Image (cartoon, grey):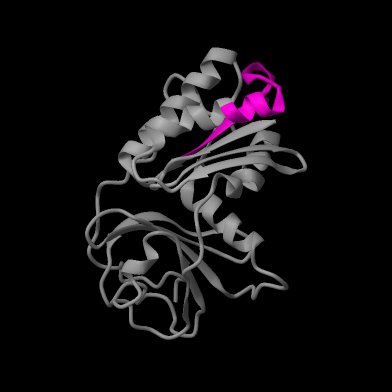
Amino acid sequence: MILCLETATDLCSVALCDKNGVISLRESNESKSHAKLLTVFIEEMLRETGIGAAGLDAVAVSKGPGSYTGLRIGVSVAKGLAYSVSIPLIALETPLSMVHGLLSGIPGQIDKNTLFCPMLDARRMEIYYAFYDSEGKTVKDISAEIINEDTFSTIPLSQEIVIFGDGAAKCMNIIKRPNITFAEDFKISASHMYKPVMQSFDNRHFEDVAYFEPLYLKDFITSQPRKNLFGN
């Protein structure tokens, strides 16, 4: 079993997973509740399943980017748990688990040409975002930007884009281009970490517990690069 911790936003979320899926989930939207609730949720889950921390195969944490305080708390708890019971530490980029969560909730066949853009709120008009294809593969790595009406101007207007996450609301009245859909009902969750976490575990993609740090992105750019995202 793998314990998954998601603290990159205001949501405090903990999921317990095995090879068949999510076994248990605890979540709270209470602002600034990570320090108060994260270890409580973990203790409740371990007591409920009766496996104990030493019975876990690994602990996984959403490594960011996102809330500085939330990430620091989540990573500290994950590292402490991994070290104390000598289990592997897995770290996932937050947008990656987000896109897996969105794709898993879309019924039917997904248009292979659609781009999926998870967005995380930074501050003021700043966002963290990346692009993925319909299979959850990275098209554009995570970056930090100040949004304006020219954001995504390097992407062909014919390209369908789905934007989601707690940073998406900032863009709705600013980015002016056709073929954009805002998935307003999307909520981040530790349960979204399940598939990529299992892939990382199977491939033994583990972090060095002593030296691992969250992904903090602090340098924002105000304009898009001139080159088209697709090299056109």
Residue 147 in percent (x, y) is at: 27, 67
Please state if 88 lies on the left or on the right of 62 as rendered.
right
Pinpoint residue 214: horizontal percent, then vertical percent. Answer: 39, 35
Q: Residue at x 59, y 15 (%)?
A: 86
Q: Which is more toward the observer, 93 or 47?
A: 47
Q: Nearer the viewer, residue 49 or 85?
A: 49
Residue 110 pos. (x, y %): 66, 72
Quarter of the image holding residue 43? top right
User: Height in image: 84 above or below 157?
Assistant: above
Residue 172 position (above or below residue 202) = below
Q: Looking at the rendering, in which quadrant would you find the N terminus?
A: top right
Q: Is residue 143 visible?
A: yes
Residue 37 sits in quarter? top left
- Percent position of residue 124, x then y: 22, 59
- Is residue 207 on the magenta stretch? no
Magenta segment range? 44-62
Image position of 158 with respect to 66: above or below: below
Q: Would residue 45 be counted in the magenta stretch?
A: yes
